[in-house]
Image (spheres, helix red, strand yellow):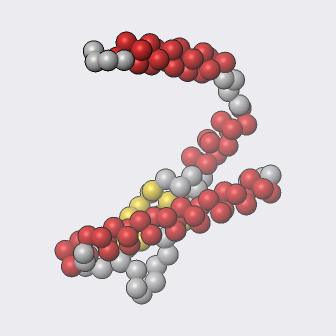
Amino acid sequence: MGRGGGARAEHVMRAERVGADLLARCAPDPRSAELREWIARSPERFSGGVSEDDVCDAEVGLGGRLTAFRFLVPNATIDIEYEQLGAEVSGAIGLAQRRAADRLAAVVASGGR
């Protein structure tokens, strides 16, 4: 161990003990568990939008998890610069996730499903 290695190891062990203590004191919230299960079972899907100019489309579930992705342009991975392709992919996924988040926020705000 280098200089300060023992102090660092002691700090890490202390942090692990504190973390374990905090985790042991956490009480499960049945309402949040129910909401997570409902989100996981939801059949709702949200798209990143498909217009004439889109290179790809992404679909996410209500929880924002990616459920489908497809390129709309043949040879997109060959004909488009990687930086642009990455931006297009990120944009499509981000838009779909924002739409899902807006819907989920509306559902939670209304207090119902």
Q: Is residue 39 above or below residue 82?
A: above
Which residue occupies 65% across, 36% down?
A: 33
Q: Residue at x 53, y 61 (%)?
A: 97
Residue 55 location, quadrant? bottom left
Q: Nearer the viewer, residue 17 or 27?
A: 17
At x 60% / y 15%, what residue is drawn?
21
Instruction: Give residue 52's quadrant in the image.
Output: bottom left
Q: Vertical placement of 68 versus 52: above or below?
A: above
The percent coordinates of residue 54 (x first, y second) are 40, 80
Q: Which residue is at 38% across, 70% downward?
A: 87
Eyeballing the image, is 34 above or below 19?
A: below
Residue 49, position as x, y percentages in the image: 49, 75
Q: Residue furthest right?
A: 111
The reply, left or right, for residue 95 in relation to residue 39 is: left
Which sits in the foreground, 14 or 52? 14
Q: Is residue 64 left or right of residue 77?
A: right
The image shows residue 100 at horizontal and vertical percentages of 59, 61
Asked if residue 43 can be seen in this view, the reply is no
- Image x and y of residue 108, in percent: 74, 53
Q: Is residue 12 visible?
A: yes
Classify 110 as above or below 49.
Answer: above
Which of the pair 22/41 is nearer the observer? 22
How many numbered markers are drawn?
0
Residue farthest left in this picture: 78
Position of the N terminus by quadrant: top left
| Outermost residue, bottom side | 52
